[in-house]
Image (cartoon, helix red, strand yellow):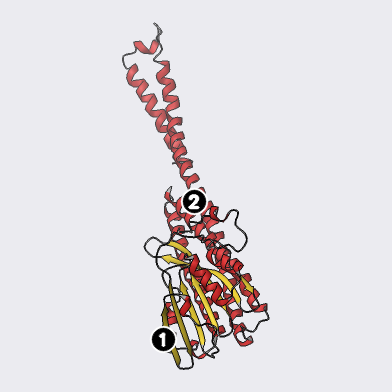
Amino acid sequence: MQKQNAIYTDKIGLPPGALVYIGKNRTEKVTISQFEFLKGVYNETELDDFSTCNTKKKSSLVSWIDVNGIHDVTLIEAVGNQFNLDTMVLEDVVNTNHRPKAEEHEDYLFITLKTLKLIESDKDVVIDQVSLLIGQHWLLTLQEEGADTFGTIKERIRSAQGHIPQRKADYLFYRLIDIIVDNYFILTDVLGVAIEELEDKIIAAPDENMHDEIYQLRKKIALIKKAVVPLRDAISTIIKSDNNYISESTKKYFTDVYEHLVHVIEDITTLHETLNDLLNMYMSGLSNKMNEVMKVLTIFAAIFIPLTFIAGVYGMNFKYMPELAQRHGYFVVWGVMIGVAAALLLYFRREKWL
């Protein structure tokens, strides 16, 4: 499971609001895109820096600025200056280990959340951070990952399809959050199938490797829960907030997102309980397997105890033992030993121990 390589030592002793990137080691160039659109009007610009981004002009167009990469602290600081953002907000943006949360400020609404992606090749889960800020006619997104999370939304804007190009910034704000939450459903469905397949294998033939599979699945479930539960509270904050950036007509969509998150939480709770049951089933299966081995060993020991006794008696070095002088004494002892073993085997089979 890929997680952030967080380094907190650089922040020790620094004042609140000091910008220090905490996350994966990245060296790629940060990209900045600006989309301006509304009801048939569309303009897309790739920006080299924020000095060419005019966010303060009076316009009815929706202006969406998408920053792909948050490891360049100097650029993030320039973003903050351009949008007049609180340094504490910027500190949360560059700390990729921060819990999802939402905050209402005087000139904007801020939310940070996690994207969860499944790598098909090894079924690993990658977690990345996305921060969104919405103000009057503008929306700012800051993505940690180089791969674009909002590619499908951008294509809809370019092709003027759907409701997004016809609506205001608050609807786009909702759709960006909604697409992240939709990916949570995909991930829980995939993990649910993996758990069902693992259950079938445990029932058929449990082995030592399955313990590690259960452990890895439990870690993934815990990762999803860590991302989803705080986000539910953040969406609740947005629904209850009284601001000029989210209209009442759009808040009903956030209510739907909230319900989706509740559903995801219920799903991951069920998956977690199922994994606990699988772990108990796995341990029980190993215990039963060990009991079968011990039963076989016990049966062998029970058969050889009387045989060892007989062999021990006639292996004693007494000078006078009547049976030793018998012509067929050797074969008689063999017959007795074979008879005892056969009688024990018949007894064990009758008791259904074999």
Residue 127 in percent (x, y) is at 48, 64
Q: Is residue 125 left or right of residue 136?
A: left
Q: Residue at x 40, y 88 (%)?
A: 159
Q: Which residue is mark 2?
A: 282
Placement of the C terminus among the 4 image quadrants: top left
The answer to whether mark 2 and mark 1 are in CB contact below 8 A is no
Q: Residue at x 44, y 89 (%)?
A: 42
Query: Which residue type does callout 1 highlight?
Result: Arg
Front-lying residue, 331 or 298: 298
For this orientation, the residue located farthest to the front is: 51
**Mark seen at residue 158:** 1
Vertical side of 307 occupied by 41: above or below? below
Q: Is residue 258 visible?
A: no
Q: Residue at x 60, y 57 (%)?
A: 14
Tag in front: 2 or 1: 1
For this orientation, the residue located farthest to the left is: 327
Q: Secondary structure at mark 2?
A: helix
Front-lying residue, 178 or 314: 178
Front-lying residue, 332 or 204: 204
Q: Is residue 27 visible?
A: yes
Placement of the N terminus among the 4 image quadrants: bottom left
Q: Secondary structure at mark 1?
A: helix
Query: Which residue type does callout 2 highlight?
Result: Tyr
Residue 24 in percent (x, y) is at 46, 60
Q: Is residue 22 left or right of residue 15?
A: left
What's the CA distance linking mark 2 and mark 1? 52 Å
Vertical side of 6 occupied by 141: above or below? below
Q: Residue at x 34, y 10 (%)?
A: 325
Vertical side of 341 occupied by 255: above or below? below
Residue 18 in percent (x, y) is at 58, 62
